[in-house]
Amino acid sequence: MSSTSTPRTVLITGTSSGIGLAAAVAAARAGWNTVATLRDPSRADALRKAAAEAGVELDIRQLDVVDEASVAAAVDGVIADYGRLDAVVNNAGAGHVGTLENDSVADVREVMEVNFFGVLNVSKAALPHLRATGGRLITVTSVGGVVGQPFNEAYCAAKFAVEGYMESLAPVARTVGVSVSVIEPGAVATEFVTNIGLDIEAEIAAAGPYADAMRSYIDVVVGQFMDGAQTPAGAAEAVMEALTADSPAFRIQTTDWARTFTGAKLADLDGSAVLAMTGAWVG
């Protein structure tokens, strides 16, 4: 990243809670002009409270990643007010639990729209400005962007797509001075799962022939979130690593568990180890 005495500017999406909120506060604490964006500004109370408690200032703005006009307005506004954009953190996303036979294609398209095309909308708008500063394009994906997981077909497909796109973009972006990284959290104690709006018993009741498998899967996942989830602040440390390291890695896991989990896939040439692992989740 180019050196300058001017404070660097970062735009972060999806900052109403969780990793996005924690990353926004951490970036501001590190001295960045931090533009914290969210789809619904009425949900910014927790963000403002966290900033006040940390003694930092955030520039909170509206940005809906699936609305190209909203994205363009937000990025243009940052350039108008700060004169530069040094980094973008694509954090906004939405979860989804379901399986192919029971999901509609429209359900899958909606998941892809937010988690994949939303990332592309923001990244495309930002890239000319990141080229100008030798900046950084950082995207929060998931271990689900490496390892496909039962009842997460649509979500994992979107995250796989993001990882494939960014892995392909990274060497191209490097030729114009832009660093590309993806952050791969495992279970994080955030509002993400709550925000899916999942009624567990209703989902199981509607699962038909997949009911037993879904109950088994949910038992595994609840155990992960209850017992092994890291804090949003812990996950945000990986974002800050990508934001500030001299030469950040392309792929950054946020915990030892995430490194072990994704490592099993990356070393599994024929796919048998991963399918044995995830098959056990559904009985």
Image (cartoon, grey):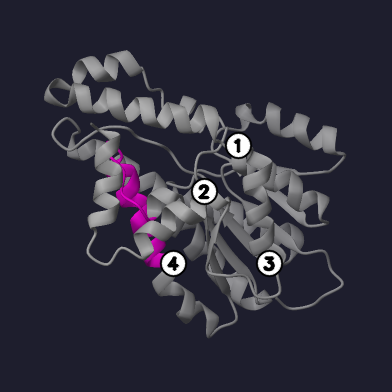
Give whichever of discs 4 and 2 has the lower sequence position: 4
Mark 1 Cα shell of 10 Å, populated few (<14), some (14-19), many (≥20): many
Which residue occupies 84% across, 32% down? 53
Magenta part of the chain: 146-166
Give whichever of discs 2 and 1 has the lower sequence position: 1
Q: Report which residue position mark 1 lands on.
A: 18
The image quadrant where one finds the N terminus is: bottom right
Q: Is residue 36 above or below residue 40?
A: below
Which residue occupies 20% across, 22% down? 211
Q: In 3D space, how far apart are the residues under numbered discs 4 and 2 (Cα atoms)? A: 23 Å
Instruction: Tell me the kind of residue under disc 2.
Output: Trp
Instruction: Tell me the kind of residue under disc 3.
Output: Asp
Give whichever of discs 1 and 4 has the lower sequence position: 1
Q: Report which residue position mark 3 lands on.
A: 86
Q: Is residue 77 left or right of residue 126?
A: right
Question: What mark, if any, has residue 257 been given in the picture?
Answer: 2
Q: Report which residue position mark 4 lands on.
A: 166
